[in-house]
Image (cartoon, coloured by chain):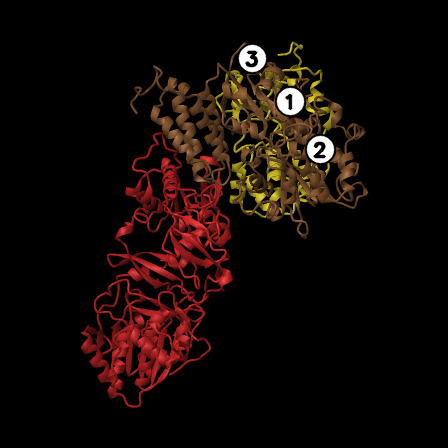
Chain colours: A red, B brown, C yellow
Amino acid sequence: MADDLVTLTIDGHEVSVPKGTTLLEAAKTIGEQVPHYCYHPGLSSPAMCRLCLVEVEGAPKPMPSCVTTVMEGQVVRTMSEEAKGHREGVLEFYLLNHPLDCPICDMSGECDLQDYVHLEGRKQGRGVEPKRVFGRDDFGGDVLFYGDRCVMCTRCVRFMSEVEQDERLTVVERGNRSVIDTFFTEGLEGTNWHGNIVDICPVGALVSKDFLYKARAWDLDHTPSVCASCSQGCNVMLHTRDNLVHRVKPRENLEVNGWWMCDHGRMDYEWINDGNRLEAPLISEDGVSRRAVGWKDALGELLGRAEELEAASVRAVASARASNEDLGALAELVGALGGGETVFRSPRAQEELVLKGFPKLARRKDLAPNVKGAELLGMRRVGDDAGAGGLDSVAEHGSIVIVLGDVLADQGEDFGAGADLYVYLGTHDSPAAKHADIVLPVTSHAEQEGTFTNHEGRVQRFWPALQPPGMARPAWLILGALDAELTGEGAPETAAELFGKLSDAVPAFGGLTYPDLGTQGASAKVGAGAGS
Amino acid sequence: MAYPYVSDKEVSVVSKGFGDPLQRRIDTYVERGGYGALKKALGMGPDDVTEIVKDSGLRGRGGAGFPTGVKWSFMPKDNAKPHYLLCNADESEPGTFKDRELMRWNPHQVIEGCLIGAYAIRAKHVYIYCRGEFFEANQILARAVEDAYAKGYCGKDILGSGHDIDVTVHQGAGAYICGEETGLMNSLEGQRGQPRVKPPFPAAVGAFGMPSTINNVETLCAVPHIVEHGGAWYRQWGTEKSPGTKLFCVSGHVNRPGNYELPLGFPLSELIEDVCGGIRDGNALKAVIPGGSSVPIINAEEVARCSLDYEGCVEVGTMLGCASVIVMDDTTNIVKQVRRMADFYAHESCGQCTPCREGSAWTAQILRRIENGSGTEADLDTLMEMTQQMVGTTICVLSDSVAAPVQSSINKFRDEYMALIHAESSAEPAGVA
Amino acid sequence: MSDAPFKNPGWAGNTGEFDLTEEQVRGDDFVGDRPKHGGHASGAGTLPYMLAEKNPEAKLFEGEYQERFEKILTRYPTKRAALLPTLSLAQELRGYVSPESMDRVAELLDLSPAYVRGVSTFYTMYNKRPVGRYLVQVCTNISCNLCGADEVLEAFLSYTDTELGETSEDGNFTTIEAECLAACGFPTCVQINSRYFENVTPAEVPKIIEHLKTKGGD
């Protein structure tokens, strides 16, 4: 162990890091962020931005910290006058031809050039020559290119060649005429991961058309979440303002998605902002008209009607878009109401889209975030690859039918017509919910706390990013309260508490707690089978 | 003799065939003793060849002056990977025109040097990366290599020795930076000719990811002579630290410009006044760039003290570089010429490192403004400080090369800059800074 | 300067102390005609000339050209390494490297078209657009500049009645500034297509232009 560690001094602090670590990464361990553009941990290091040069005692020249590896006893200074003076000089070079159009730049507020210059730039630039002009170019897909803002770090070119491995971008020309470009009119269309080049662009050169002029970076709240578009479970950040999701950005998790996410998942957020939501519990007495009621009345009504039924049996339809907590609470309630089968449906894509340079990451065939979670909780998958069909036995069930989260798009108005009690929990109304006796409004994953279990059994938390509409509440809270009434046990008050219970009951989740999961998740014991 | 002029001060070793069209022909070359050194080398072990070159003290003639034998000894001796020898024939340093002459007058000397070098470093393939603009030299080399193949000097089992060495002439496509050794490797591999970050060094990871050595044309041309006559023989010329002879490319304001092969340590003033017939039109000497445009400029007083070897040049604050002596008389507009060099570097910067990409163009812009009479004294301070930011901060030394002529000329010819800054036509009043 | 009689415009043979013919200096007598198929594979990649006659519509890599391309491939351990010579081959026929040529070369060498564009724009010898029958490249770098290169450039522009980089109306001449051509002892050096014209003075420029117009040559 000790043989593999190298001890050196960075800015007066002694650090021990594994052999082969770069100075830049070693400095991170003591909280020093050496400014850089071209370096990105997920890409090769060309050491060309020259911003990360640091002073190494005994070296004749400043060393690029992104490629220089640690040596025993080395003395490194990242904040010496020499290093700072050097950065000041390089930053002046960067600003020579930069348009300084921060007021209208989408990157403003989260721009590495802005930040570094603010921190360590010259008070006054000396460049008085006319600036070079490249103008703007549509790169296709979601990407716009502002050539004049580019710092030529080539992260985008390297992402396309090394990670996506579809070399659509290149550096054209040389010297200070160099500019990033595509092959003439052929752009990024048809590639599946190009949104990432906008993320890794350290300045406002590559911007998202979808996000263009929508919000200022400093107005956005960032909430850690998990992408709900497939079962990969990419860690993401939801960027919100005014209770709307404005964009989705990948969040680093080396076990799941690295620094990346697919374009489909990135763009799949508008549904969260859909204003046409169920906002209050609805009760129907005659199966035709519905009236909005408060939660107390709604739950009282539900329990009252259930009590009237003797020897009830339940058929439930769950959704692989619901959290582990929601599904767990549903399973409990089904048991408490007399037991029965819970099924779920989930659409499946024809093939996986693997990110070649980071093959751990793919857009999975299962296009819902919690297929694995539903399976681990003992729910049976039914229906076809479009997520339709397979509900005949439920549709005609006579006793209790509970639907959670499935809008039943393929089902007709007579769904559940024969049931004694038909309860529909959803975010949106649907024709098939029309005859539900009780409709309960629930929150989307962006409005509640919870966990999803990804395709390989990794349980990952997400946090509430938005205020729920009207009276909508998390399904686990509603279902948990009902279950508590039926069983006489206490109702769960937090998602963490409910997950703790689930963890005790379901062997696959055995032992896991929210603190264990942290922000990066942890693996369930896949293969441990369903519990309860 | 050195085409197109001859001087009796010359020592003809590598330049022997200059101006003799028969020298190109393989029969003549062999008749005159050519490929004898190759035969001799093949009779020795590869490391013995390297030892001889080490003994001779031969230093790289491409500009850096690194000892050739030592460079060869860095190559791994026992691995299964293919090794490559790259002959750097991408001559493009302003003021330098020796390699073109070596290739067009005596191509077999180049080929023989390459073959011996390849044998010494255990390479089975030599790439002669010849500058793209040199159509004539490329054709002559290609023809000569073809002849060498026909006579069994290249290819399989050369001269019955059991060793295979292929030679390929690779034509460049127009980029100064491909004269930088790792830029050349990238270019040879079909990439943009951007220099690579070192380490790893070429002897470990070079062309096609394999151990490689890269030598200048002139360096390799000296090798057959050294192998044939021995290291001590080569040391009869030059100084202790800079042994041997060197081609001096003299251009600019002299009466007899051209290539002259002289012992290292030759006095610069004698080269100009005697060998090159003095300054044109009887003018006075103003300045000299002794090693190609990338080295600091020196004034007449320093010229008088300068001896042309690696150390002698350093003593007067400049470098021997590739011994390209650019002579300027007293009619020269120094600012204009420095600006022209800055334009060149801005044009040739590969563009990967920021200080060089932005700094070289900015330097040229400021110098142009001064040249046109719109400069200020503050511009000179900016130039000095900003070019200093370009020294030692980039992957290769092109950036340093921008700083050398700018800083040295401002230091030594500040009055010329000031005259332009304070000229009547100046757009801004003097002293505004 | 030598008092030798004038022999041929823009050829260094009339300078200095040697008495040689133009063929002897240029090595034409030694090289002879090199076949379109490239001759021996070792030098097949060097053959591309800048020809006066160009056909932007020419079919690429057919017949002898295909043969040459295949020879080039045999000389490198990777396909990509053949990129520069292959681009030269395309330019030899078409006079410039068009997007279509890049695309075709990319296909032949299993590279992405964008990559090929990136590489071809790095190098100055690949023309990005069509040029005249004669591409005149005047070195104006320091050594030539000291000896009057700016005037030589001026003379070419005025005698061909063009601006820098523009092609003359008759389609004959495109004049551009070149960086050091490594013929600093023979200022001013001018490269016209694949040939170096050395010791060029402004006075010689009209003779060179006339020579090319009437006698042609590559």
Quadrant of the image for the C terminus of chain B?
top left
Percent coordinates x, y for residue A515 in the rendering: 34, 70
Tell me which amino acid carries mark 1.
Tyr
Q: Nearer the viewer, mark 3 or mark 2?
A: 2
Q: Quadrant of residue C143?
A: top right
Q: Is residue A115 left or right of residue B56?
A: left
Q: Is residue A208 visible?
A: yes
Q: Can you say whether B228 is above or below A475 in the image?
A: above
**Which mark, by number, is residue A416?**
none
**Which mark, by number, is residue B232?**
2
Quadrant of the image for the N terminus of chain B?
top right
For mark 3, what is the residue? B280
Q: Is residue C157 visible?
A: no
Tell me which amino acid carries mark 3.
Arg
Q: Secondary structure at mark 3?
A: helix
Q: How far is mark 3 from mark 2, CA to CA?
A: 39 Å
Q: Is residue A232 left or right of residue A238?
A: right
- Mark 1, Cα crowd under 10 Å, few <14 / some 14-19 / many 20+, is many
Q: Residue at x 42, y 34 (%)?
A: B388
Q: Can you say whether C166 is above or below A387 in the image?
A: above
Q: How far is mark 1 from mark 2, CA to CA?
A: 23 Å
Tell me which amino acid carries mark 2.
Ala
Q: Residue at x 62, y 31 (%)?
A: B242
